[in-house]
Amino acid sequence: MAITGQSGEGMIRLFTDMYGNEIPVGNTEAATTPGHFQEDFSVLGDLFDGDAGLVLLSKASGYGRLTGTDEAGYGCALATEVCFSPALNGTIVVEARVELQVLTARNIFIGLTGTIDDNIVESLTAGTATITKVYPSVGFLFDSQLSSPYDTIWHMPYLLATDSTQTSTDVDASQIIVAGESDVLRLEVFSDGAARWFVNGKLEQSVGPGLAATPGTLLGVVCGCFGTANTITDLDVDYLLVTANRDWTR
């Protein structure tokens, strides 16, 4: 008789509290250096460039500073493989507590995206009042290239493979970002492709089935900073948490 179900560890939980390894900035490595890990996540980016890395900070709760390169569109990120399907693994939760030192010359993305390369590039970019897809993505975006006052606000874009752009004013949060203060960002993507966004515990946005993600498409987690000009970027991270359900398909 065929068994139609399986039993085991059903919950996927990935977490880093920034008490793990460092990748010192300025400690140039060869391009062939094996991958690095911060607890449950890969550290991706142009790590053989002397600008990029991850340094732990002497700060209450334990923070790590991701530092990217001075190349537009490139950066440094904590990430997973592209391995989460809303239909098979939902509900997928991505939650991070982060802090920006300054609000200039940077692109920050925290969420789910359809393509993740070792030399990671931005999933979304923005300018004036438009957010533009690089890869299908859903999550939180800060981009200093947006016009004031939207260059000090978290945005909550959702761009499918068939989408190209979104207007920033349609997906902006009600809370502004303050340099030197931490925000807790939480994204929930459901098995039907619906999603909810929370900032500091407040529900800021929700969209219906199939709008935030294509249920059967694989996505990966990214929490990273990316350059917008010839300026080195950074992002301080207290923790990154990802939870999902295991796919028991045989």
Image (tube, grey):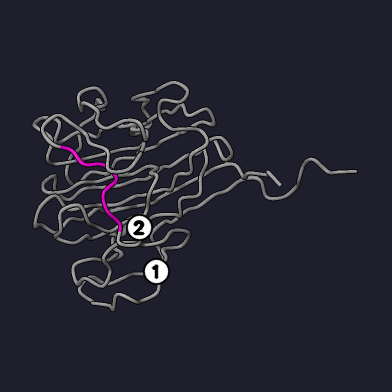
Residue 161, given in percent of the width and then of the height, sits at 37, 35
Please give the count of numbered marks on the rendered protein.
2
Alpha-carbon distance for marks 1 and 2?
Answer: 14 Å
Residue at the extreme front: 162
- Given the image, on which type of amino acid does mark 1 rest? His
Q: Quadrant of residue 4?
A: top right
Q: Position of residue 72 (x, y in %)?
A: 15, 53
Q: Is residue 65 above or below residue 180?
A: below
Element carrying mark 2? loop
Residue 169 against residue 249 in the figure, above or below: above
Looking at the rendered structure, the kind of residue marked 2 is: Asp
Q: Secondary structure at mark 1?
A: strand
Q: Quadrant of the N terminus?
A: top right
The reply, left or right, for residue 76 in relation to residue 79 is left
Q: Which residue is mark 2?
A: 117
Residue 125 magenta-drawn? yes
Q: Nearer the viewer, residue 108 or 133?
A: 133
Q: In this rendering, would 176 be left or right of 55?
A: left
Determine the residue positioned at 20% across, 46% down.
107
Query: Mark 1 against mark 2, which lies toward the viewer?
Result: 2
Q: Residue 13 at x, y = what percent?
A: 54, 49
**Proximity of marks 1 and 2: CB atoms separated by less than 8 Å:** no
What span is colored magenta in the figure?
120-126
Q: Earlier in the sequence, mark 1 or mark 2?
A: 1
Q: Residue at x 16, y 44 (%)?
A: 179
Q: For residue 36, which numbered disc appears in the image?
A: 1
Q: Is residue 51 left or right of residue 89?
A: left
Residue 140 in which image quadrant: top left
Residue visible at 28% across and 78% down?
A: 30
Instruction: Judge whether residue 107 is colored magenta.
Output: no
Q: Residues within 10 Å of mark 2 (few under 14, many from 20)?
A: few
Q: Which image quadrant for residue 169?
A: top left
